[in-house]
Image (cartoon, rainbow, N blue to C red):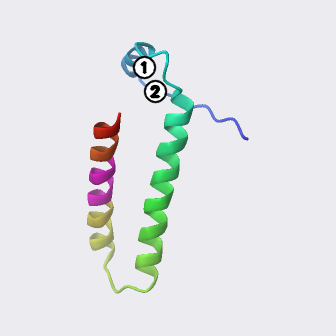
Amino acid sequence: MVNMTLAVPKELKEEMDDFPEINWSEVARIAFKRKIEALKVLKDFSSDSEMTEQDAIELGRKVNKALRKRYTENA
């Protein structure tokens, strides 16, 4: 496995510290994996599509919104 360093705002780190039982590295791995899966879907979809760049941006925003909702509901 490769190590990666992330920067988070001090306030976020302080909130994360309130939950020491959470494996934040695993949370980040899951988030990265889900984002990549969503991007792959978009890439596959757009490769055979006549969708405009603006359409793709809007769809990406909708996917991100849905993912944010999923994370906040399952957090």
Mark 1, Cα crowd under 10 Å, few <14 / some 14-19 / many 20+, is some
Front disc: 1 or 2 = 1
What residue is disc 2 on? Answer: 8
Mark 1 residue type: Met
63 in the magenta segment:
yes
Q: Tell me which numbered mark, 1 or 2, is placed earlier along the sequence.
A: 2
Q: Residue tagged by mark 1? A: 16
Q: Which of the numbered marks, if any, corresponds to residue 60?
A: none
Q: Position of residue 49 (x, y in %)?
A: 38, 85
Q: Quadrant of the C terminus?
A: top left
Measure how far apart labels 1 and 2 are at the Cα level: 10 Å
Q: Which residues are magenta?
A: 61-67
Secondary structure state at the residue bearing disc 2:
loop
Residue 4 location (% of width, % of height): 64, 35
Specify few, some or many for label 2: CA neighbours under 10 Å numbering under 14, 14-19, or 20 or more. few
Most common SS among magenta residues: helix
- Whole-percent x, y for residue 67 in the image: 33, 50
